[in-house]
Amino acid sequence: MNYRHAFHAGNFADLQKHAIVLALLEALTAEDTPLSVVDTHAGAGAYDLGGDMAQRSGEAAAGIGRLQAMAQVPTVFAPLVAAVRALNGGGAGSLYPGSPLLIARALRKTDRYTACELRPDDFDSLRRTLAPYALAQAVKDDGYATAAARAGRGGRTFVLIDPPFERSDDYAQIVATTKAVLARDKDAVIAAWMPLKDLETFDAFMRAMETVTNDALAAELRLRPLTDPMKMNGCAMVVVGTPKSAEGVIAEVTTWLADTLGDAGAKARVWRA
């Protein structure tokens, strides 16, 4: 696999994904039921935005860099900015937490977290990142299969699906995994991230999702018109089983990013399938 998230860590897509994940975790950990979290494509766990890959892309400067430079951080991004600062000793710094670190730090003693990563070098980094957290386990396993196998095995299931989309079947795998997880835990929460390159690909995915659930919330972030399928023109988070208290945050996060970071014609669209 050639995809390396270190090139893209801290960009606009991470801001949407991570702010939404933290909002979902806040809602779910407010309940008494323990959580069983599976991260299907966990990556390295944390990233150095001062490193060569991040510096070459420059995407973090236009994402988390711009957000942190604001005199007043929007309330919906405050938990993410606080997590970034905590990782950097309470102040400014070049380290950025991936979803594994954000999840591990948010969970309670009764919760469990399984982070899946197949790429050997990223897995080694992931294992080191999660080592201080007894409730977290890094596994070098297929994330789709792991999510399906572990759903419903104790506590409420929360699955984060964030593949690199290098495989031609990733969209189909998300749909199949959603179906398998819901079969084992009808109350599961499933959050899937995906790039927006062209509208037909996303629409086809949503039509497929409608065959396995009637409870999908789509948060589309379009930074530019979807006219060039060779570019990531935006991204989307599709959440199944969204807690009511998180719905407003999801809409606010997506709208702020479109209004603040988007080109002319940028838009946010949050809707239910």
Image: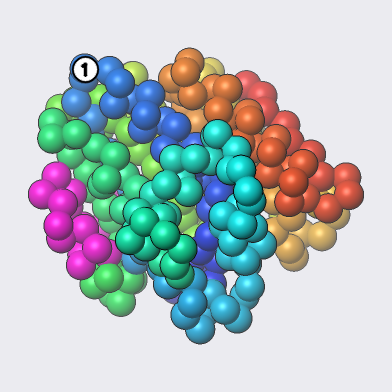
The answer to whether residue 184 is visible is no
Horizontally, residue 18 falls left or right of residue 196, namely left
Q: Is residue 230 left or right of residue 246?
A: right
Residue at figure coordinates x 73%, y 51% from the top left: 261
Pick the front one: 87 or 90: 90
User: Which is more toward the observer, 72 or 53?
Assistant: 72
Quadrant of the image for the C terminus?
top right
Q: Residues within 10 Å of mark 1 (few under 14, many from 20)?
A: few
- Quadrant placement of the N terminus: bottom left
| Residue in front for this viewpoint, 132 or 114 | 132
56 magenta-colored: no
User: In the picture, residue 117 is in which quadrant?
Assistant: bottom left
Left or right: residue 66 versus residue 188 is right
Q: Which residue is the extreme one toward the bottom?
A: 52
Q: Helix or strand or loop: what does disc 1 sit on?
A: loop
Q: In which quarter of the image is residue 222?
A: top right
Does residue 7 appear in this view?
Answer: yes
Q: Per the image, is 136 magenta?
A: yes
State how the image is colored. Answer: rainbow
Residue at 20 percent of width and 67 percent of height: 128
Q: Residue at x 61, y 57 (%)?
A: 69
Q: In this view, does 110 lie above or below 73?
A: above
Q: Name the residue under label 1.
A: 32
